[in-house]
Image (cartoon, rainbow, N blue to C red):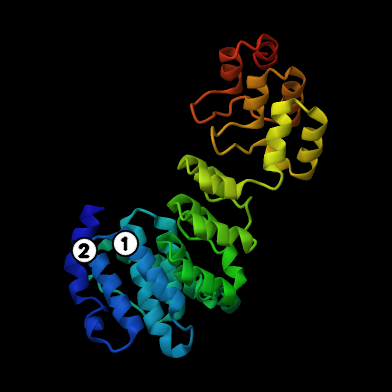
Amino acid sequence: MKRLGLFLSLALVVSPSRGLAAAASDAEERLAAAVRQVEQGDFEAAIPALEAVVGQTSTAASQSKLLARAYLYLAIAYLGLSQEADAKARFLDAVVHDSSLSLSPREFPPKIIHYFEEAKREAEAAPEPQRATTAAPAATPGAQPFLAAVKAGDFPRVRDALDADRSLLQATDATYGATPLHWAALKGHEAIVALLVSAGADLSATNADGETPLQVAARGRDKGIMKLLMPSGATEFFEAVKAGDVNSVRVLLEISPALLTTTDADYRATGLHWAALKGHAALVSFLVAAGADPQARNGDGETPLQVARRANRAEVVQILAR
């Protein structure tokens, strides 16, 4: 990555970005600032800045070359982080917005040229409808700036954006497949989590690693946010489990199957952990049969079997040790 950054620091000095800092438009000024981050090899900071430029720039023909430049440097930033698939997709976006775009071998390193030319050949070979489909992400303005506002904890901006467009709740970033709720949970922005939940954000949405927002919050051990992200009926579920009330647990699971893998905010324990701790053998058998994970870990890294052994629940140990 450092080597690519060194190439860029030399190559981009004479790249198509020359003179952008002196441009009058705000979009071009923000693009110039992001390009400087790419030049300096600060790819992780450049990506959200460039995504914001893309999201806030009109898709009108007059803005196509600016969009193409933004996508070009976004692709270069992804390539600098060895995220080749994302880089190729953004190179393709750049070509879609400016089919005349070309890169000189005297100005760009071979790796960038290779991926850019590959994307350009793919775009030229694609039929017209496919080209239009490739450009579709840019037709949803505001998604990337919205995610940036969520990450920054900018409550007023997030609230105002949602008032204007509720579909932003389903936005996902290109790198991690994370929704706004995932990012708010990860960053610990409790007020924004509450806002997103009340607005109807999907609590069961998963990121590229298969994690729900609750699981992301659990990693950060943020009890306040975890409570906000609990599925409907979680409080009643854990109370029923602790009481050994198999019938109530069965009904609650029929209503909300996600409760089977839900963890509490205090100990990150599943229902099976609690049933094991309390020695409710019948309930333990029911939860295991329903699909509860015997290998799930609580906040102390214990499985339900380890909890049962610690609590001297011999009958439960026998069930879980099978």
Disc 2 marks which amino acid? Gln
Discs 1, 2 touching: Cβ within 8 Å: no
- Residue 268 against residue 181 in the figure, above or below: above
Which is nearer the eye, 226 or 164? 226
Q: Secondary structure at mark 2?
A: loop
Task: In the rendered structure, find residue 45 and report the number of the disc placed on it.
Answer: 1
- The x and y percentages for residue 48 are 38, 65
- The x and y percentages for residue 29 are 29, 80
- Can you tell which of label 1 and label 2 is closer to the viewer? 1
The residue to which callout 2 is attached is 40
- The x and y percentages for residue 210 are 56, 45
- Regarding residue 112, the answer to whether it shows in the image is yes
- Image position of 1 (left or right of 131): left
Looking at the rendering, in which quadrant would you find the C terminus? top right
- Image position of 26 (left or right of 223): left
Which is nearer the eye, 20 or 153? 153
- Residue 307 against residue 120 in the figure, above or below: above
Which badge, 1 or 2, comes first in the chain's sequence? 2
- Image position of 239 (left or right of 99): right
Tell me which residue sits at (56%, 62%) in the image: 195
- The x and y percentages for residue 224 are 52, 47
Which of the 4 quarters of the picture holds residue 194?
bottom right
Tell me which residue sits at (73%, 41%) in the image: 257
